[in-house]
């Protein structure tokens, strides 16, 4: 099924990991076919840090890592503009990341990526085709949805993402 809209979904690690954990390929193969199609048509983008969080450098890759690895081109690197935006985002939302963490944290980079793309085409707010997808709570002042609201970036949770694409799934018991 094709997406209902022309949205470009900038997906967070949390959304991909949640789909993998709760809607695995063996249970919902249609979901994974839809995701594959969005990746192939470049309707799902993310940041290199998300890629690095999901795809191990060595060892066995699970189904999610295999899917993501096939679409490395959909994961964007750091740019000069993103590097300027991230400190700005973190000055307003310092608790978006854990400063004690030794690994890169993707959240401010995903947001900066969307802001950068929106600036390139001069679209903001509800008119933008760029949407961040995460599983983070809209009630927390320190999570992706709050930052999105501040920067007038659209945000969808997983169920809204499924609905936006017109996807419906049912679990069938095989005998």
Image (cartoon, rainbow, N blue to C red):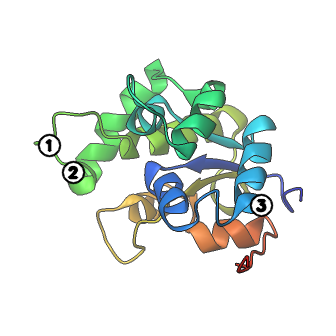
Q: Quadrant of the N terminus?
A: bottom right
Would you call the spot at circle 1 few (<14 residues within 10 Å), some (14-19), or many (20 or more)? few
- Residue sitting at x 81%, y 38%: 41
Q: Position of residue 14 (x, y in %)?
A: 44, 56
Where disc 3 sits, the SS reads helix
Q: Position of residue 97 (x, y in %)?
A: 24, 48
Would you call the spot at circle 3 few (<14 residues within 10 Å), some (14-19), or many (20 or more)? some
Residue 115 visible in image: no
Q: Which mark is residue 27?
A: none
Q: Which mark is residue 99?
A: 1
Q: Quadrant of the C terminus?
A: bottom right
- Residue sitting at x 49%, y 50%: 12
- Tell which circle, 3 or 1, labels the residue nearer the N-terminal end: 3
- Tell which circle, 2 or 3, labels the residue nearer the N-terminal end: 3
Q: In whole angstroms, how far apart are the C-alphas of marks 2 and 3?
A: 38 Å
Where disc 1 sits, the SS reads loop
- Residue sitting at x 41%, y 58%: 144
Front-most of 127 and 23? 23
- Tell which circle, 2 or 1, labels the residue nearer the N-terminal end: 2
**Residue 49 falls left or right of residue 71:** left
Q: In whole angstroms, how far apart are the C-alphas of marks 2 and 1?
A: 9 Å
Disc 2 designates what residue? Answer: 94
As displayed, is residue 5 above or below residue 171? above
Q: Are marks 2 and 1 in contact (CB under 8 Å)?
A: yes
Q: Which mark is residue 30?
A: 3
As displayed, is residue 63 above or below residue 31? above
Q: In whole angstroms, how far apart are the C-alphas of marks 3 and 1?
A: 38 Å
């Amino acid at each position: 099924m094709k997406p209902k809209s022309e949205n470009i979904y900038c997906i967070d690690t949390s959304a991909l990991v949640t789909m993998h954990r709760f809607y695995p390929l063996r249970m919902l193969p249609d979901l994974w076919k839809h995701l594959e199609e969005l990746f192939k048509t470049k309707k799902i983008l993310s940041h290199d840090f998300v890629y690095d969080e999901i795809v191990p450098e060595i060892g066995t890759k699970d189904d999610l890592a295999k899917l993501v690895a096939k679409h490395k081109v959909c994961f964007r690197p750091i740019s000069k503009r993103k590097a300027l935006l991230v400190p700005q985002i973190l000055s307003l939302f310092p608790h978006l990341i854990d400063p004690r963490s030794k690994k890169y944290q993707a959240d401010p980079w995903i947001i900066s990526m969307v802001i950068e793309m929106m600036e390139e085409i001069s679209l903001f707010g509800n008119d933008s085709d760029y949407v961040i997808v995460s599983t983070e709570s809209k009630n927390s002042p320190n999570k992706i949805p709050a930052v999105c609201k501040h920067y007038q970036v659209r945000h969808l949770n997983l169920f809204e993402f499924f609905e936006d694409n017109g996807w419906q799934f049912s679990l069938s018991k095989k005998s």
